[in-house]
Image (cartoon, grey):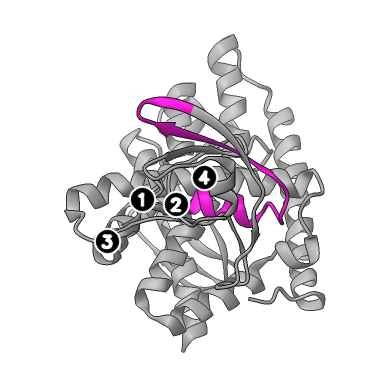
Amino acid sequence: MYIILAILAFGVLIFVHELGHFALAKINGVRVEEFSIGMGPKIFSKQGKETKYSIGLFPIGGYVSMMGEEQAVDDERSFSAKSPLRRITIIVAGVCMNYILAICIFTGYINHFGYTNTFANSIKSDSPAYEAGLQEGDTFVKVNGMKVFTYDDISAGVLLSYGNPIDVVVDRNGEKKDFTITPNISEETGRYAIGVEFTRVNDQGLGKSFTQSFKQTASLVSQTFKGLGMIFTGQANLKTDVGGPITIVKMSAATAKAGIWPLLYFTAFLSVNLAVFNLLPFPALDGGWTVILLIELITRRKVPNKIVEGLNYVGFMILIGLMILVTLKDIIFPVSF
């Protein structure tokens, strides 16, 4: 049951993403030939007036097939006939929909559970923060060079320090102050901490929840880029810190067991990660398409189809290869949580 809920949650992410492409294609007058959720053999297919709607067996992706997407077609309704700017709006619409989904979920979640602020409500005596000189009322601005949007940014910065000194910037009465703090293991939690307590806000209202949801989304974007940076620089442990489709389904099922709100939060988390990943300037991803179209927009010259097709083919094969590798990794070295 929980596995089914997990798969459905992942399917929602794909549907919302592809719906963004589909909607903007229609708005820009592009003929959509197929709207598909899932990959592999079709388990459902229905031909509409001009678009085929399909569901694939494996819920690991989806696509919107547009006339003139792969090769130039001499038709005013083809993707290739539209201006670079119009094509960019179609390409980035999927990512925008993922961000919108995350913001909507976070708004409901924060309105229901509240959020933790980012200023020091109290500081324990003899704690790392106390010894460094932090005071009550200090608002955290940066942790190790990363902008603080929410309490999660502070928590992640402390936990990922593994006991090494961290650079902290706080706002004290309108003045920025720099500190270096060395986290230690908390006797209460058994995790790295600096001895600062923050206040939980529970009377935020819908308007404040909506505002805070943007900060939560920005926080996840920042943390996702930091995580990618750690992977590419070798700072992350690929065995324990990186997971693929199997890990995602297992984690989704675990959150589903905890209740609908944890599952929704995890869905929003995945939605942001999917958006960030898709915007990477890599061939076959939305970000790669956007770079090509920006080149056309700036140079006013169309990038040859052979080059685009070649880049997308190579990029797609690399992505498939990575998908296979992380799936095998999930089986051989499963992530524990």
Q: Please tell me the numbered disc located at residue 117.
A: 1
Q: Circle 3 — which element?
A: helix
Quick check: 43 left or right of 316?
Answer: left
Identity of the amino acid at label 2? Tyr
Q: Circle 1 — which element?
A: loop
CA gap, disc 2 to disc 3?
18 Å
Question: What residue is at 79 percent from the left and 57 percent from the top?
Answer: 321
At which x and y percent is residue 231?
75, 50
Question: Looking at the image, do the residues carrying marks 1 and 2 touch, with CB atoms under 8 Å apart?
Answer: yes
Q: Is residue 259 shown to the viewer in this render?
A: yes
Residue that carries the numbered disc 2 in the rendered image:
151
Ranked by sequence position, the earlier of labels 1 and 3 is: 3
The region drawn magenta spans 152-176
Quick check: 251 left or right of 20?
Answer: right
Image quarter in which the C terminus is found: bottom right
Question: What residue is at 31 percent from the left and 47 percent from the top?
Answer: 212
The mark closer to the camera, 2 or 3, is 2
Question: What residue is at 64 percent from the left and 54 percent from the top?
Answer: 183
CA gap, disc 4 to disc 3?
19 Å
The image shows residue 128, relative to residue 114, as above or below, that is above
